[in-house]
Image (spheres, grey):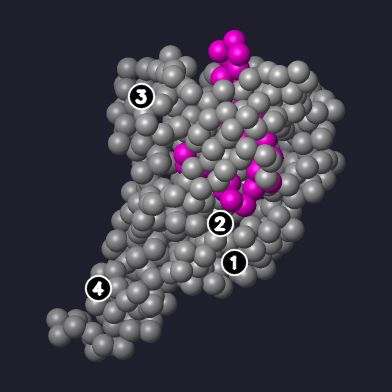
Amino acid sequence: MSSATTYLQNATADLGELRAHFAPAFAKIAEANLERERTRTFPHEQVSLLNEAGFGTLRIPLDHGGFGASLQQVFLLLADLGEADANVSHIWRNHLAFVEDRLNAPVSDTNDIWLERFRAGEFVGGGWTEANNVTLANLVTTVAEEADHYRVTGTKFYATGSLYAGWLDVLGRGDDGELLTALVRADGPGVTLIDDWDGFGQRTTASGTARYERVRAERGDVFPAAERFAYQGHFYQTAMLSVLTGITRAALRDGSAALIGRKRNYPQGLTEVPSDDAQLLAVIGEVSADAFAAEAALARAGEALDRIAGDDDGAQRRLIAAEVAVSQAQLVIIAAALRATTNVFDALGASGVSEERGLDRHWRNARTLASHNPRVYKARILGDHLINGADPVPNFAALGRGGQGN
């Protein structure tokens, strides 16, 4: 969707060409994925490799120095990256969302500067969530005006990608109570990043605590939160679903390789060689169907977001359509990922649980990501919309809770 007043333009990229461009980087990232998972080594080099390849400029139009990709293409590429390394793919979620926000913003000198930063490879991390059950209604973080700048004070958790970032995206309240988002330098005075994420999955995403003590934010780097792009929540959710899709494919890849390499079968087996056993082959076939369903659902969700991007006239109608598509995709993809990462072990025997293989990482990562997206509510919301015409789009302001994708 093109807009004369924002940076959004019709997508011009070809998915095959994009995949060919990033395939070498994805392959290199996949090489040591198992070792990084085993040792909890943070993928600084891998994030930098993608920056050098221009991954952060995927959505930026060609005439502004980017690739001109559609949202659907971005999410499918995130799935490719998720197959290579689920943590690295997850790390890019906040950056790509902020790029999308600036593309939806009015053309201005300030936003021209941000596009230049993206082209230069400057990376955005951060988080909006506060610990101890703090919601939007009682947000503690402040963005206080001071002379010609602002000062940010507060503590955030789930600050995904912060250890890799040059900029941190922080949500807080202004002096008049208005919600503001402030972009601050990650290495600025008063910023403390703590590696205290203790989840059993996605362990190298740097999703721990970020503390801000009177951190300076320039006027051109502070924006009203109410003006964030309308489909922000759907973007964050779909980015998670991209990673889950990649994990499902990784389970298929690694499970297939393990079955091919398996030498002994159980006494009850149909054949002496496990890779000839029809029941074990059926397990892999089912996992392949899960991977297929996940990617198909992801593509449909991405397509729905492409239809809403830049469409101010049909915004509410398309927002509802996007909510339905993304909710349906959540139900399909989360179920497929958890099923595939569990059932793949049925084809492998006891050797499949070897720490050396590390196949458990796929389930741990999938379960962790699934717990970030509340699928438990989605079927009810969809049914209420389809049968009773209820609006499926949550009003987080009225609820007093919500944030970067629910």
Which residue bears the numbered disc 2? 88
Which residue bears the numbered disc 1? 29
Q: Is residue 160 above or below residue 246?
A: above
Q: What is the quadrant of residue 306 in the picture? A: top right
The CA distance from mark 4 to mark 1 is 33 Å
Residue in view at x 69 percent, y 62 percent: 49
**Residue type at tag 4:** Gln
Q: Residues within 10 Å of mark 3 (few under 14, many from 20)?
A: few
Image-based side of 405 in relation to 335, left or right? right
Where is residue 141? Give x, y as percent: 53, 26
The CA distance from mark 2 to mark 3 is 37 Å
Where is residue 15? Give x, y as percent: 66, 53
Residue 344 sits inside the magenta stretch: no
**Residue type at tag 2:** Val
The CA distance from mark 4 to mark 2 is 35 Å
**Residue type at tag 1:** Ile
The CA distance from mark 4 to mark 3 is 39 Å
Considering only order in the chain, which callout, 3 or 4, is on the residue closer to the N terminus? 4
**Residue type at tag 3:** Leu
Q: Nearer the viewer, mark 2 or mark 3?
A: 2
